[in-house]
Amino acid sequence: MGPHRILLLEGIHQIAVETLEKAGYEVQRELTAFSNSELIDKINDFDAIGIRSKTHISKDVFEACTNVKAVGCFCIGTNQVDLVAGNQFGVPVFNAPYSNTRSVAELVISLMVSLSRKIFDRSKKAHEGVWDKSAAGSNEVRGKTLGIIGYGHIGTQLSILAESMGLNVQYYDVIKKLPLGNANSVDGLNDLLATSDFVSLHVPETDQTKNMIGAEQISKMKAGSYLINASRGSVVDIPALAEAIKSKHLAGAAVDVYPKEPKSNKESFSSELQGLENVILTPHIGGSTEEAQYNIGIEVATSFIGYLSKGQSVGATNFPNIDVPVNDSGHRLVNIHRNVPGVLGEINGIVSKYGANINRQFLSTDNSVGYLIIDLDVKDSQSLKSDVVALPTSIRTRLLS
């Protein structure tokens, strides 16, 4: 059996390649996204696949991937992957929930200042030869109120940076979160919208967050306030936002993510927000810094190594998490099975049948699957594995030495 083969798509940072190759893996790195048909055609040549936001892995891809053992999203979001299907087919999905939080938070800070000073509009005029030197409509951000919707990894980082610049910070989250610094939690979304000079969105893409900021919510925002969305493109009703800018209800907006985005830099981009006054449009670059991509590359590549070489599933978003030490001797049996009664007894019966000695055993389950790791000493490890594979409850089984 040769080294693990990894497919990395969408120009994932070179550090991921170096990290995986240092672990003895073979890596194929592509600069573009793959379509579903391309994935289905090529995916079983690899043990794991790494993607960013443009490659979508649906249920039919998981049905076809008999060899792929893990998927890595080299970003924060995992909405481009059918997580339920991955779980059902025994494929854990890893992501990088921490590595680009600083980059996104810094971008939002820069967008707040730019909107408050109308920097982009005045820069455009200067490029066109127009000298628009005026204090009218320009304000400091100090003393203003920032409302953060979604107080997670990015929201809390933004909260700290904003407070250090003299902003008053308040936040709303559907989950009760303790504040950092002097930030205040508000009880309802409408309360936050009505009392914030800047509203910044940091929520995941779910059925509950789709168009959560529409015409009704925008109408409740303070007149002359600003909206910033660097979370997910489905969260804001773009036509409603465009209308609020045109009517001057909002003084400006900054958008980094969109309901429909180009699949590559070669495709054109269009939005109802183009050409509007004091509207900053950026091409989904919240996490696009060298530092963030470097850290993401290391984080997800390390998750691949931990899972493929040791069976470690810590950080998987759709899968039981198990943190296991290195197995210094003997064999490690890794089994994913349907979570029904009696499976552990059946597998331990097979282990007993072959006279194996169990050194350590780990089990974690969710509603659908169980994840079992057994460190054991046994002579006929391949036959033991074959018997476990033959169990009707088994989904995937590996034998690690």
Image (cartoon, helix red, strand yellow):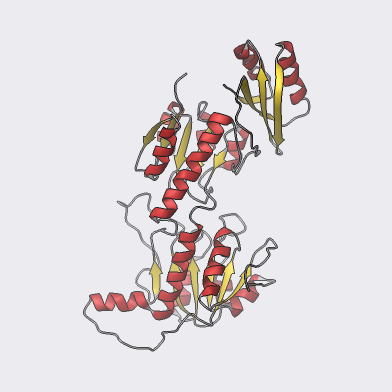
Which residue: 49% across, 64% down? Answer: 105
Q: Is residue 100 above or below residue 181?
A: above
Find residue 303 and report its horizontal and vertical position in percent: 53, 39
Q: Quadrant of residue 110?
A: bottom left
- Image point 50% across, 46% down: which residue? 80
Residue 309, position in %: x, y?
Answer: 54, 29
- Residue 380 appears anywhere in the view: yes
Give the left or right position of residue 196, taking residue 47 as reference: right
The vertical placement of 307 against 350, above or below, is: below
What residue is rendered at 65% in x and 39% in y?
321
Name the side, left or right, on which 290 lies relative to 170. Answer: left
| Closer-to-camera residue (138/355) | 355
Which residue is nearer to you in this view: 306 or 151? 306
Q: Residue furthest front?
A: 328
The total number of labels drawn is 0
User: Would you say residue 58 is visible in this rendering?
Assistant: no
Q: Nearer the viewer, residue 336 or 158?
A: 158
Residue 283 located left or right of residue 333:
left
Residue 258 position in % (x across, y down): 45, 59
Residue 159 drawn above or below residue 324: below
Can you give x and y, in whole percent of width and height, for residue 263 in the image?
Answer: 38, 49
Instruction: Establish if 207 lies above or below 341.
Output: below
Which quadrant is home to the C terminus?
A: top right
